Structures are given as structure tokens and as C-alpha cells.
Amino acid sequence: MNPSSRRAGGPFRRAGGVRGFLAESPAWDEELGGLWYVDADAGLVHGWRPDVPVDTRFDLGMPAGFVVPRVAGGILVGAGLELLAIDADGSRQTIAELPHSTAADLRINDGKADPSGRLWFGTTALDEEHLPIVGAGALYCLRPGGSPEQVLDGISVSNGPAFPAAGDRMYYTDSWTGRIDAYPLDRGQSLLGAAATFARLGEGEGYPDGMTVDAEDHLWVASFEGSSVRRFDPDGRLDRVLETPVSNPTSVVFGGEDFEVLFVTSGQNRLTPSQLADQPDAGYVLWTRPGVRGVPTHTFGG
């Protein structure tokens, strides 16, 4: 750890009353005035607002990977191997579908829109013990009006990405490697430059999972099985560690009126009954005020 980095413990509180098995992919929607997220294995999309006691809920009928707001209104969801446009009334349309694999049971995992309105999302495949099949997944880019283009292969667990304000870099992780990479990004094309290692999580620090960038261009990363959220400066130096009351934080996003609230999704998966008893917050969306502001969630331009 950088000698100047700080370790703290929150405080974290629950954002809402719905407990998921594997809450993932939080996105703050200014039009909604609240948070979208998925319960991945349950195939559910939740829309949470602090002033409404009951969540909006869409049942997809297949595993859910991510949710992002759309410029045109509504949301874009990755589920199974499909990209679904869902309107406020719940009506949905499949806008793209990835090819099925005979070698592995692939599913869409995490995804985000970049500052140019393109969507970047990846796939993963799990074995019978719910462990990733190494190298079976890929990373894709979808430009508004286009079709998904594969830009990386050999991915085990695709997570992220996140983008600094300039939009000239993409942070991305294949979680299974424990490494966060930085890719030069062409704002006009679905092209990535050569990857450079940005940061690594060491032994006992968990796996890098979902991520976001704050207003100071620092990267916040959920550490799955690491009981923490980690903040890195633009040079990849560890700046801060927020300890979470859950072992498995899955992703992070800033929201609230002034983007001063950090929301953290979490999961119950891979916890023993004893761990679950000790972690009553596991599976909930948590929040804290870390003392820095975030930036609005990027919307898909299609």
C-alpha cells in the first residue's frame, strides 16, 4: 500500500429494503432520481428511488449482467446473451444477440457506456461449481445504431469498465487475473490500444470487480472477496481503502443530488451459512459519503 493511502470503515448504510443474491452493476439515473441495478443470478432489474418505498422491478427470465440508462429514455440491459431495450412501462425489445457457444455456457456480465455513448460489455462462462471457465469470454463494443463488435477474447470474468473524464482511456479487468488494465481509447471507433497494467490486487485482497471514476479522475474498485472498496490515483497508486461490512462488494457508482454518495452493490454468493449470519448486509445495496464527488453515469447513445 502507498504510505500515504488511508484505510477507513465507512460508515456504510443500506440504501433500500430489497436483498439480492448477487446485486451488480449500479447506475445512477438522473431522470429516475435513483439507482438501477441487477440481481444477476435471479435475472432481475431493480430501480430504487430514496423517496419511493417500493422498487421498480423487471423480471428478465434469464441471468442479468448489467443495466445502463439510455439517451432515448429507459434502460439498456444485458441478459443471457441478449441486449434488451426496456422502456419505463416495462415494454422491451431485443436490439442485439450474441452468438451461442457450443464449448461453454456463455452469459453477458458487466458493462458500461463511455463518454461518447458507446457500450462496452463482456461475457463469462461458469462451470458446474459456479467457477469461471478460464478464457471462455470476450469483450464487446456496441456503437449506437451498430452491432456488437468483439474487441478482446480469452477473457475469464469480464468486469468494469470505467472511463476518466477525457474519454481517452478505458479501465478494465478480467477479475480472475487480479489485474486492472488501462487501454488507450479511440473516441470515434471501437478500437483499443495496447493494454498497460494499471494496478493489481495482491494475495488476500480479493478480486477487482465493478468500478467507477470520480470527479478527480481517481478510480474506485470493488474488491470481491476482499471486503473493501479501493481508490487509485490516475497513476495507479493506491490512495484509499474503504472497508465494507460485506465480504463480496461487487460494484460501485456515485449518485445523489450532488454525486456525493458512493453506492456499493454486494452479493451473498460464495458465502457459508456462518459468514451469512455474520454479514446481514450481504446482498443489499450500501451507501456512504466518502468526501469526494463523483460524475454522472454515462448513458448509451442508442
Image (cartoon, rainbow, N blue to C red):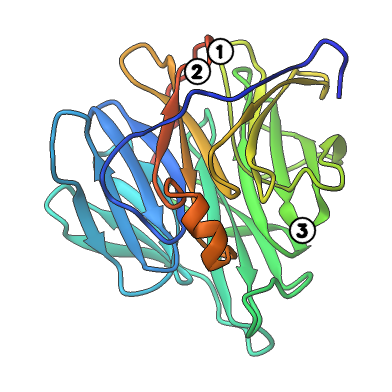
Image quadrant assignment for residue 85: bottom left
Dot 3 amino acid type: Trp
Q: Position of residue 163 (x, y in %)?
A: 62, 29
Residue drawn at x 67%, y 51% is: 225
Image quadrant assignment for residue 30: top left
Q: Nearer the viewer, residue 130 or 294?
A: 130
Mark 2 or 1, nearer chain start: 1
| Residue linked to disc 3 | 176
Whether residue 296 sits left or right of residue 194 in the image: it is left
Q: Secondary structure at mark 3?
A: helix
Whether residue 42 sits left or right of residue 194 in the image: it is left
Q: CA distance from mark 2 to mark 3?
A: 27 Å
- Quick check: marks 2 and 1 in contact, CB under 8 Å? yes
| Residue linked to disc 2 | 294
Mark 2 or 3, nearer chain start: 3
Image quadrant assignment for residue 189: top right
Residue drawn at x 31%, y 15% is: 257
| Residue linked to disc 1 | 215
Q: Nearer the viewer, residue 298 or 25?
A: 25
Residue drawn at x 69%, y 35% is: 170
Dot 1 amino acid type: Ala
